[in-house]
Image: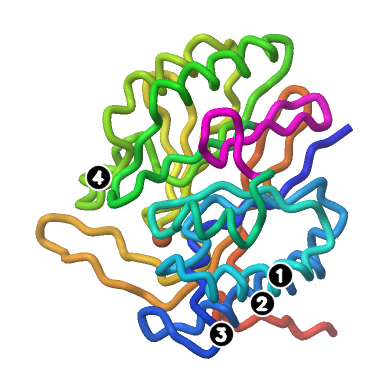
Amino acid sequence: MTLKFVVMSDLHVMPEGELSMTLDTGDRLEQAVDAVIARYHEADFCVLAGDLTDLGQPAAYEHLKTIIDRIPIPVHITLGNHDDRPTFLSVFGEDFLAETGKVDKVIDAKGYRIILLDSSEPGRVDGVLDSGQINWLQARLAEAMDRPVIVILHHNANALHIEADNIRMLEPDAFIDALKTHPDIRQVIAGHVHLTSTATWRGLPFTTLAGGHYSVSVDQPHIPMRRLTGPGQMAFVIGTPDSTTVLFDDFIDGNEEIFLAVD
Ligand SMILES: [Fe+2]
C-alpha cells in the first residue's frame, strides 16, 4: 500500500491568450497535465498548492478549469497570494470552502493524512494562517495521531536565507507549535518562492518546489536573483509506512537526452 501523489504549484494561469512575465502559463500547465497523463496517471491524486492564477480574474479561473479537467486523477486545491478566494469559489464552487472559511482540506489515503492549508490573505504577498485555521489544524492532527501526516500549503514557513524570506509565512510559530503536537509529520510542502529547496527547522522537514511559472536563481548578497524560464517543475510524493520521498519532475527542462551507442 504505497501512497503516490503529484503536487503542482505556482501555475499563474492567465485568461486564454494572455502571457505572464512573457510566459504562456496556460501552455506550460497543459505540458504539466500531459506529464501527469504520461507518468502519474496511476497516482492517488494531484494537489494544486496555490498561485493557481496570476491575477485572479474569472476568465483565468475558467481557463485553469478547462486545462485541469484533463487531469485523469482526483484534484485537490488550495490557494496562494496571487489567487482571489471569492472569484475562485465563484468558478469552482463553494464546496472548496472548509469550516475555517478558507480553502483548507483533509485527505486520508493509504494510511496517511494529508492536510491542505490556505495561507493566502487578501492584499498580502506574505502568508497568514489565522487562529481558526491553527485550531482546525490541531484538531485534524489530533484525529490522526496513529498515522503519518503531510502538510501542503502555498507559503513556506521556514526561512530559506534568501531575499524572498520577507514574503514567507508571517509569524509561523503558532503553525510550528501546532505541527509539533503530532509525532509523525513527514513533510511540509510549499511553493511560493519558485525555487527548489529542502530543509529541516525545529526538527520538522520542509520542501519547496519551483512550480510551473518562472523559476529563480539563488540570490546572495553579491549575486542578484535572476528570473529563469524553466524548468516547469512538479513534485511526486511517494509514501510508504516508514518512508516519505519527494521527487522533482522538471517537465519543461530543455535538456537533451543522452543516448549511448550500443555495440
Ligand atoms: Fe507564485
Label 1, residues with CA under 10 Å away: few <14, some 14-19, many ≥20? many
Q: Nearer the viewer, mark 3 or mark 1?
A: 3
Q: Nearer the viewer, residue 36 or 170?
A: 170
Residue 149 sits above or below residue 80 on the image = above
Q: Earlier in the sequence, mark 4 or mark 2?
A: 2
Specify the farthest residue to the bottom: 17
Magenta span of residues: 96-114
Q: Which residue is mark 2?
A: 30
**Quadrant (top left, top right, bottom left, bottom right) of the C terminus:** bottom right
Secondary structure category for the residue under label 3:
loop
Q: Earlier in the sequence, mark 3 or mark 1?
A: 3
Q: Earlier in the sequence, mark 4 or mark 1?
A: 1
**Residue 106 magenta:** yes
Q: Nearer the viewer, residue 59 or 188?
A: 59
Label 3, residues with CA under 10 Å away: few <14, some 14-19, many ≥20? some
Label 4 and label 1: CA atoms lie apart by 30 Å
Secondary structure category for the residue under label 1:
helix
In the image, residue 141 lies at what x, y percent?
A: 61, 16
Q: Which residue is mark 3?
A: 16
Q: Which residue is mark 4?
A: 165
Mark 2 is on which residue type? Glu
Mark 3 is on which residue type? Glu
Label 3 and label 1: CA atoms lie apart by 16 Å
Contact flag, marks 2 and 1 (Cβ < 8 Å): yes
Residue 198 sits above or below residue 58 on the image = above
Contact flag, marks 4 and 1 (Cβ < 8 Å): no
